[in-house]
C-alpha cells in the first residue's frame, strides 16, 4: 500500500477515459485502471471498420478528448494518442475485484443485498459501509488506495464461471487470445455461442497443431443449425457443423460437464457419464452483468428490477460516499453522454460545484415552448412537485427522464390523442386537467382526470391502441413519457410502479365493463385484484376446475382450448384488454375450457366473489356480461359441432393456430402470412418491398416456417412489446403513427436490435445507389430491373467522392426492417404486389377466428 | 407558444383482408361473372342484330368489337407494367390478375366474333392466331399456377423444417468442401473422378434439363457409381477413405436432386411466360399491321 491517489478511475471506456483525461489536465493525482491491455474495450470490440455515431447531435461534447462520428479505428487511434499526450496515468491489465472503505464504519449506513437463486429463493446479505479512503483490490493481488473512486466499467460484465467440481483448477480458462499458440493439447470448449465456436474452430483449424478439440453443446442435434445453436450466428454454426462432419473437431450434443480434474474431464451425456482426456477447458458461457460486483462495493441500486441502475446524486455520487458512477453503468448508453459525465464528475471532485451539466441546452429546448419562463431546474422542481409518480425521483434521474420525454402545452379543448390511435407513451398532467370522452358523438359524456394523475397507461402496458379520446378540459401542461422512459421510471422508482399499477387496474376494469360503473363501485375489486405474470404455455384456467376468479389480460395474449374427443381443440384467441372466466361465475359450475398464455403475459386476477357482488348490484353490467358470454358460447358450440363431422379439419385448424402462436402471432399486431397453395414463388412481394423502401427488401419470403400450407416468412410482426426496442442506445426504435414499429435515422448500427428480435427479421445493411427508372429499364434495359439490386451492381455503381464524411455515409450499415409501409397510400406493398393473393398482412385477432375454419381450414 | 403533440396517423388508408382469397376467386369471382355476362351479350348481339351483308368487320358491330378487342389487348399488356411499378395507391395486383385472366378469355369471343369467321392466309388471321396463342398460353399458366405451388412448398420441407433455395446451394457447397477434404488421401484416378463432381456447377444444365429435371450426364452420379465400381476390385479395409467419400457423394446427390426438383418446378411456373409475353409483342405488331391494312387498303 504505497501512494494515496486523489481519484482512481475504474474502466477506460469513453466515460472513464474522459474522466482520467480531465484529471490529468487539472493535474489531479490520479490513476486509470483498465482490465484489458488496451483502452475502451467495448469500442475496441466493435467489428472492424464500424462507423461510430455521435448522437444525440444537439448535445455538445465537453471533454479533453475528441469525439466525432467516424471509423472505429480512427477514433481509437485518436484517443490513444491524446491519452498519451495528456500524460494520463493508465494501469493496464488491472482488473478491479473489490472496493472497500478503510475509514471508520459509517453509522447507520448498511446496504442490504438480495440475491436470487435459480429456484427462486432469496438470501439477503448486509454490508456495513466504511468511510474513504478506499482500498481497491486488483485481480493480481495488488491494492491501490484512493480518496475517491469513479466507477465507469460499462455494462459488459464478467464471463460466467464454471460451477462443477474442479472449476477452480488453473487449466479452466475463460478466454483464448491466440489459438495458434496452443499445440498438441486435448481441449474442451464449453458453450456454443459465437465466442465458443470461434475458439474451437481456431484451435482445430490447422491439423499440424495436433490439437484434439471437443465442443460441448447442451442442445440436441438437429439438421437445422439454428435450432441446435440458438445463440450463435448461422454462418458460424454451419462452419462448426462442417468441421465436425469433416472430423476436424467433435461436437458433443446434449452434454454438460460433471467434474474436472487435471488431465481429464467427466461429461454428463444422454447415454450416461463419460470421462475423456482434457488438458485445457475454455468456458464461453456468456457473461453476467456487473451488478453483483457493484453492489458489493456498497453501491445501492434503485430496485431489484433487471433494468435498474444505481441510485445517484445529481453529481453522480452513489450511496457509498466518494464513489461516483458514470457512463453506461449509470444508465447513459451513448458515448457522448459518457464522455461529458467523465469531465463533469472530475470537475466536481476537484471542487467545481457551479458547473452546469452539458445536457442543459437539450432540456432548455424541451421546456422552451411552455408558457411561463422558468429555468430548467425550476421546471424539474415544478414537475416533481405536481406529478405524483415523479415524486420519488432524484434530480439526476429526472434530468435523464426528461431527455426521453416531452413537456407540452395543450390549450383548452385540444385533443391529446384519439381513440384507436396507436401509442405506447404515458401522459402525466402537471398543470390543468383533461377529460376522457366516453361517447365519440357526445362531447358532454366525459370523465375528468385531475392534475397530478396520469393517462395513456393502457397503451403503455398492453402495447395496444388507445382506448379512448382525451381532450384538454382547460389549458394544461402534460408530460408525454416515452415507453422507454416509462419502463425505466417503473424500475427506478418502486412507488411510481405501484401507483401506475393501481391506476391501470382500476381504469382497465372500468373501461372493460363499460358504462355505469364508477371507481366507487370497484373499490373492493381493485383492492383484492392481483397482478400475476404467466409464462408462455402456462394455464390460468383449467377445464374442469372449480374456482370462480375472473382474469383480465393486461399484457400478452391467451388462447382458449378445450378437450374434444381426447384432443385439445383451439377455440379462440384473446388479445390483451379482454377478460375470461366469467362463465363459471355467472352460471356456476366447472370451468368449461382451458386458458393458457400464448406468450409471456400478465393478468389481473379479480376475486370472483367480490366481482359477483358488483354484478349483483349492477343488473346492466350483468346483462352485458351475459351477452359477451353468449357470443363465446356460440363460438365454442360451433367448433365442437364441427369436430364431430369434420374432425380432420378441426384438428388441422387447431394445430395451425398453435403453430401460428409459436411463430409469434400471440404478440404480433401485424404479420405477413403466405398461403403456399397460392404462392407461385415469383418474389414480386420482395421486389415490391425493395422498390418502395430504398432498394432493400425487408422480407425474406422463402425463409421462415410453415405449417399446413400457411407460411410465416421472415418479416416483422410489429410486436405489442417489441423485443428489438430493449437495448437501443439512441432509442431509435419507436412505434410510429400507424402502429408500426420503425427504426429512425438515429440508428447507430450497433446491431442490438438484430440480436434481440426473436424472429430474426432485422438486417444490417447499407442503402444501395439509386436505380434508373422503371421505364428506362423496360425500354432500354438500363439498370438491374425491379427489386433489390445485386450486390455487384451496387458496388459498381456506388460513387465515392473522396470526401471521407460523404463516403463513410455511403458505406454506413444501419438496421433495416419492415415499417408496415406506414404512410404509403394503399398499405403494404408486398401484399398489393402479389399477383395471386397468396400474401396478406393480418393482425392475430382478425385472423385467429373461427371464420378460418371455413375459409382456410383445409 | 403552444405546441401540440404531432398529429397521429399518417392518413394513408389501407385495404384489410383477413383471409386468403386467391386471384381466381377474387371478390367471389366478380370478373368471371362480368366476363361471362359480356360474352353472352356479345354472342346474342352477333346472332340477332341484323347487319348489312359483306365484311362483318366493317359493320358498326364489327368496328365496336374490334376497338374493344384492341383496347383490351393493350390493357392486358399493361399488367406487366402494373406488376413492376410499385406506386402508392389502393390497387392490388391480385385484382388486376383476376380481371386479366377473365377479360383475357373474353377476348376469344370478342376477337373471333370480330373476325366474322373469315379466316385466311393473311395478316388479319395472323393477328387472331397470335392472340389465341397468347390466350392459350395464359390458360396453361393458370393451370400451372393452380397445380404446382403445393409441390414447390412440399419439396422445400422435411422433418426439420423449411430450407430455402439459397440454403440448398449452401448445403451443396458445404458438402463439396467436405468431399474435397475427404478426398485428399485418394489415389490420383479416384481423385480425378471426385473432382468432376466438385467442378460441376449446380445451376448448370440446359433449359431442357431444367424443365424435365433430368440430367443424364451428371458428374456426381457418375463419380459415385464409378468409385463404387472401382472399390469392388480393391481389398476391403477398415477406415477406407473411399467409404467416407462415397457417403458424402450420396448426400450430395440427394441434395442436388432436391434442388433440381425445386428448379424444375420454378421453371414450369415461369416458362409459360416466355411464350405469353414475347407472343404478346408479336401480337401487338400484327395487330398494328392489321389496323393499318384495314384503314388504308380496304
Ligand atoms: C456494437 C455496439 C455499437 C455501439 N455503437 C455506438 C455508437 O455508434 N455511438 C454511441 O454513442 N454508442 C454506441 N454504443 C454504445 C457505447 O459503446 C457504450 O454505451 C459506451 O461504450 C459505454 O461507455 P462506458 O465508458 O460507460 O463503458 P465501456 O465503454 O463499456 O467501458 C468499460 C471499460 O471498463 C473496463 N472494465 C470493466 N470491468 C472492469 C473492472 N472490474 N476493472 C477494470 N476495468 C474494468 C472494460 O474493459 C472497458 O474497457 C454501441 C454499443 C455496442 C455494443
Ligand atoms: C391477348 C390477351 C392477353 C395478353 C395481351 C396478355 C398479356 C400479358 C402480359 C403482358 C403479362 C405480363 C407478364 C409479366 O410481365 O410478367 C401477362 C401475364 C399474365 N397473363 Fe396474360 N395476356 C393475355 C391473356 C391472358 C389470358 C387469357 C390468361 C389466362 C387465362 C392470362 C393469364 C396471365 C397470367 C396468369 C399472367 C401472370 C401474372 C403474374 O404472374 O404476374 N393472360 N399477360
Ligand atoms: S423487429 Fe422483431 S422484435 Fe421488433 S417488432 Fe419486429 S418482430 Fe417484434
Ligand atoms: S409491409 Fe411494406 S415494409 Fe413491410 S415487408 Fe411489406 S412491403 Fe416491406
Ligand atoms: S408475390 Fe405472392 S405469389 Fe409471388 S412470391 Fe410473393 S407471396 Fe408468392
Image (spheres, rainbow, N blue to C red):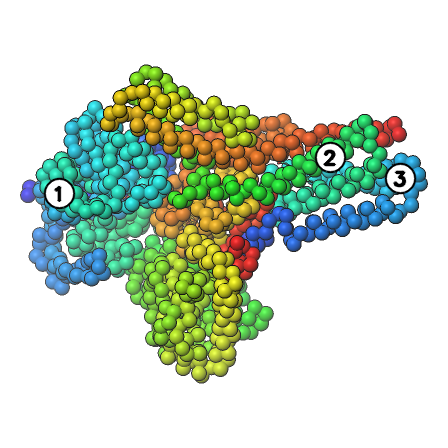
Residue A260's label in the rendered image is: 1
Locate residue A112 relative to residue A480 in the image: left or right.
Answer: left
Residue A728 in percent (x, y) is at 37, 47
Q: Is mark 2 within 8 Å of ligand 2?
A: yes
SS of the residue at dot 3? loop
- Residue B196 drawn above or below residue A783: above
Report ligand 2 position as a quadrant: top right
- Output the chain of dot 3: B
Task: Residue at 59%, 51% (x, y): give it.
Answer: B21
- Residue A492 drawn above or below residue B246: below
Residue A817 in percent (x, y) is at 45, 44
Sort mark 1 into few (<14), some (14-19) or many (20+) by Cα contacts within 10 Å: many
Find the distance from the CA under tag 1 to the CA under tag 3: 99 Å
Residue A323 visible: no
Label 1 in the same subunit as label 3 = no
Residue A440 visible: yes
SS of the residue at dot 1? strand
Locate residue B9 relative to residue A343 in the image: left or right.
Answer: right
Find the distance from the CA under tag 2 to the CA under tag 1: 80 Å
Task: Residue at 62%, 41% (x, y): give it.
Answer: B143
- Output the chain of dot 2: B
The one of B133 and A214 positioned closer to us in this rendering:
B133
Task: Residue at 24%, 35% (x, y): give it.
Answer: A250
Residue A659 in percent (x, y) is at 43, 53
Pointer 3 residue: B59
Sort mark 3 into few (<14), some (14-19) or many (20+) by Cα contacts within 10 Å: some
Residue A806 in percent (x, y) is at 44, 31
Mark 2 or 1, closer to the camera: 2
- Output the chain of dot 1: A
Residue B131's label in the rendered image is: 2
Label 2 in the same subunit as label 1 = no
Which circle's residue, 2 or 3, is located before the other in the chain? Answer: 3
Amino acid at each position: 500500500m504505497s501512494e494515496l491517489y486523489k481519484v482512481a478511475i475504474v474502466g477506460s471506456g469513453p466515460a472513464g477515459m474522459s474522466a482520467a483525461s480531465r484529471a490529468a489536465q487539472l493535474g489531479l493525482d490520479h490513476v486509470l485502471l483498465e482490465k484489458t491491455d488496451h483502452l475502451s474495450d467495448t469500442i475496441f470490440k466493435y467489428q472492424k471498420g464500424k462507423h461510430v455515431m455521435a448522437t444525440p447531435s444537439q448535445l455538445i461534447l465537453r471533454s479533453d478528448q475528441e469525439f466525432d462520428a467516424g471509423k472505429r479505428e480512427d477514433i481509437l487511434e485518436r484517443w490513444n494518442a491524446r491519452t498519451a499526450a495528456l500524460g494520463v496515468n493508465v494501469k493496464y491489465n488491472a482488473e478491479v475485484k473489490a472496493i472497500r472503505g478503510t475509514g471508520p464504519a459509517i453509522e447507520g449506513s448498511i446496504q442490504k443485498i438480495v440475491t436470487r437463486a435459480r429456484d427462486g429463493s432469496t438470501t439477503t446479505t448486509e454490508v456495513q459501509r466504511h468511510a474513504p479512503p478506499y482500498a481497491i483490490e486488483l485481480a493480481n493481488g495488488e491494492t491501490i488506495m484512493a480518496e475517491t473512486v469513479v466507477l465507469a466499467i460499462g455494462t459488459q460484465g464478467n464471463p460466467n464461471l464454471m460451477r462443477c467440481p474442479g472449476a477452480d483448477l488453473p487449466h479452466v480458462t475463460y478466454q483464448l487470445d491466440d489459438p495458434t499458440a496452443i499445440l498438441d493439447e486435448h481441449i474442451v470448449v464449453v458453450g456454443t455461442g459465437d465466442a465458443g465456436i470461434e475458439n474451437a474452430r481456431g484451435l482445430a483449424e490447422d491439423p499440424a497443431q495436433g490439437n484434439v478439440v471437443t465442443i460441448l453443446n447442451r442442445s440436441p442435434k438437429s439438421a437445422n443449425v439454428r435450432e441446435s445453436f440458438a445463440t450463435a450466428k448461422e454462418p458460424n454454426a454451419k462452419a462448426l457443423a462442417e468441421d465436425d462432419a469433416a472430423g476436424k473437431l467433435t461436437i458433443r450434443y446434449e452434454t454438460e460437464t460433471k467434474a474436472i480434474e487435471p488431465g481429464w474431464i467427466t461429461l454428463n451425456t444422454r447415454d450416461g457419464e463419460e470421462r475423456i482426456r482434457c488438458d485445457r477447458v475454455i468456458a464461453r458461457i456468456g457473461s453476467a452483468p456487473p451488478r453483483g460486483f457493484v453492489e458489493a462495493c456498497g453501491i445501492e441500486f434503485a430496485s431489484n428490477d433487471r433494468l435498474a441502475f444505481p441510485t445517484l446524486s445529481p453529481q453522480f455520487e452513489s450511496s457509498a460516499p466518494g464513489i461516483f458512477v458514470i457512463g453506461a453503468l449509470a444508465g447513459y448508453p451513448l458515448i457522448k453522454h459518457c464522455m461529458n459525465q467523465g469531465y463533469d464528475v472530475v470537475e466536481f471532485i476537484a471542487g467545481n460545484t457551479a458547473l452546469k451539466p452539458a445536457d442543459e441546452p437539450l432540456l432548455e429546448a424541451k421546456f422552451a415552448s411552455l408558457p411561463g419562463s422558468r429555468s430548467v431546474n425550476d421546471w424539474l422542481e415544478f414537475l416533481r412537485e405536481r406529478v405524483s409518480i415523479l415524486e420519488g425521483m432524484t434530480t439526476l434521474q429526472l434530468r435523464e427522464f426528461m431527455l426521453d420525454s416531452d413537456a407540452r402545452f395543450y390549450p383548452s379543448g385540444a385533443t391529446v390523442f384519439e381513440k384507436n390511435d396507436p401509442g405506447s407513451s404515458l401522459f402525466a398532467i402537471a398543470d390543468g386537467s383533461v377529460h376522457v370522452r366516453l361517447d365519440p358523438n357526445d362531447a358532454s359524456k366525459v370523465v375528468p382526470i385531475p392534475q397530478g394523475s396520469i393517462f395513456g397507461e393502457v397503451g403503455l402496458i398492453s402495447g395496444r391502441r388507445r382506448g379512448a379520446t382525451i381532450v384538454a378540459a382547460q389549458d394544461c401542461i402534460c408530460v408525454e413519457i416515452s415507453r422507454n422512459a416509462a419502463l425505466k421510471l417503473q424500475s427506478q422508482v418502486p412507488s411510481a410502479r405501484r401507483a401506475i399499477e393501481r391506476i391501470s387496474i382500476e381504469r382497465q376494469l372500468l373501461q372493460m365493463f363499460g358504462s355505469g360503473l364508477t371507481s366507487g363501485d370497484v373499490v373492493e375489486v381493485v383492492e383484492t385484484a392481483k397482478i400475476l405474470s404467466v409464462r408462455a404455455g402456462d394455464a390460468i384456467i383449467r377445464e374442469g376446475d372449480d374456482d370462480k376468479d375472473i382474469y383480465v389480460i393486461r399484457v400478452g395474449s391467451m388462447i382458449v382450448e378445450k378437450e374434444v374427443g381426447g384432443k385439445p381443440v383451439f377455440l379462440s384467441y384473446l388479445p390483451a384488454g379482454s377478460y375470461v372466466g366469467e362463465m363459471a361465475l355467472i352460471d356456476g359450475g366447472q370451468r368449461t375450457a382451458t386458458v393458457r398464455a400464448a406468450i409471456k403475459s400478465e393478468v389481473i386476477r379479480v376475486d370472483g366473489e367480490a366481482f359477483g357482488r358488483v354484478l349483483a348490484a349492477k343488473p346492466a353490467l350483468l346483462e352485458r356480461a351475459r351477452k359477451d358470454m353468449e357470443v363465446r358460447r356460440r363460438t365454442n358450440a360451433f367448433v365442437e359441432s364441427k369436430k364431430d363431422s369434420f374432425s380432420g379439419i378441426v384438428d388441422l385448424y387447431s394445430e395451425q393456430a398453435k403453430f401460428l402462436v409459436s411463430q409469434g402471432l400471440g404478440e404480433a399486431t401485424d404479420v405477413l402470412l403466405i398461403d403456399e397453395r397460392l404462392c407461385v414463388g415469383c418474389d414480386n412481394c420482395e421486389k415490391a418491398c425493395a422498390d418502395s423502401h430504398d432498394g432493400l427488401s425487408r422480407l425474406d419470403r422463402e425463409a421462415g416456417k410453415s405449417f399446413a400450407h400457411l407460411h410465416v416468412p421472415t418479416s416483422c410482426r410489429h410486436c405489442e412489446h417489441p423485443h428489438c426496442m430493449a437495448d437501443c442506445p439512441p432509442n431509435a426504435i419507436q412505434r410510429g403513427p400507424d402502429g408500426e414499429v420503425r427504426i429512425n435515422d438515429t440508428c447507430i448500427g450497433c446491431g442490438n436490435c438484430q440480436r434481440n428480435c426473436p424472429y430474426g427479421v432485422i438486417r444490417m445493411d447499407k442503402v444501395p445507389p439509386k436505380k434508373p427508372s422503371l421505364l428506362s429499364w423496360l425500354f432500354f434495359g438500363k439498370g438491374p430491373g425491379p427489386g433489390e439490386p445485386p450486390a455487384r451492381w451496387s458496388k459498381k455503381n456506388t460513387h465515392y467522392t473522396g470526401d471521407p464524411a460523404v463516403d463513410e455515409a455511403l458505406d454506413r450499415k444501419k438496421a433495416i426492417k419492415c415499417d408496415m409501409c406506414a404512410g404509403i397510400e394503399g398499405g403494404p406493398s408486398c401484399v398489393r404486389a402479389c399477383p395471386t393473393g397468396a400474401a396478406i398482412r393480418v393482425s392475430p385477432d382478425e385472423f385467429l377466428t373461427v371464420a378460418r375454419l371455413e375459409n382456410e381450414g383445409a | 407558444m403552444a405546441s401540440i403533440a404531432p398529429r397521429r396517423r399518417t392518413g394513408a388508408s389501407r385495404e384489410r383482408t383477413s383471409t386468403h382469397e386467391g386471384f381466381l376467386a377474387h371478390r367471389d369471382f366478380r370478373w368471371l361473372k362480368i366476363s361471362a355476362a359480356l360474352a353472352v351479350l356479345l354472342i346474342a348481339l352477333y346472332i340477332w342484330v341484323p347487319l348489312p351483308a359483306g365484311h362483318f368487320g366493317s359493320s358498326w358491330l364489327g368496328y365496336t368489337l374490334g376497338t374493344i378487342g384492341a383496347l383490351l389487348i393493350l390493357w392486358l399488356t399493361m399488367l406487366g407494367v402494373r406488376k413492376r411499378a410499385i406506386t402508392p395507391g389502393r390497387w392490388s395486383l391480385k385484382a388486376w390478375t383476376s380481371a386479366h385472366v377473365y377479360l383475357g378469355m373474353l377476348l376469344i369471343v370478342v376477337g373471333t366474333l370480330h373476325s366474322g369467321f373469315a379466316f385466311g392466309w393473311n395478316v388479319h388471321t395472323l393477328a387472331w392466331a397470335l392472340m389465341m396463342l397468347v390466350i392459350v398460353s395464359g390458360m396453361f399458366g393458370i393451370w400451372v399456377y393452380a397445380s404446382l405451388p403445393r409441390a414447390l412448398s412440399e419439396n422445400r420441407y422435411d422433418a426439420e423444417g423449411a430450407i430455402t433455395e439459397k440454403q440448398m446451394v449452401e448445403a451443396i457447397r458445404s458438402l463439396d468442401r467436405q468431399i474435397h477434404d475427404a478426398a485428399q488421401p485418394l489415389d490420383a484416378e479416384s481423385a480425378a473422378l471426385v473432382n468432376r463432381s466438385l467442378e460441376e456447377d449446380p445451376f448448370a444444365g440446359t433449359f431442357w434439363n431444367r424443365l424435365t429435371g433430368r440430367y443424364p450426364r451428371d458428374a456426381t452420379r457418375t463419380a459415385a457409381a464409378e468409385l463404387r465400381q472401382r472399390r469392388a476390385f480393391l481389398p476391403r479395409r477398415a477406415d477406407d477413405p473411399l467409404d467416407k467419400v462415397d457417403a458424402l457423394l450420396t448426400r450430395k446427390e440427394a441434395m442436388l436432386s432436391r434442388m433440381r426438383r425445386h428448379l424444375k418446378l420454378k421453371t414450369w411456373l415461369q416458362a409459360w411466360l416466355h411464350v405469353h409475353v414475347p407472343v404478346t409483342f408479336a401480337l401487338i405488331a400484327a395487330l398494328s399491321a392489321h389496323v393499318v391494312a384495314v384503314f388504308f387498303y380496304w
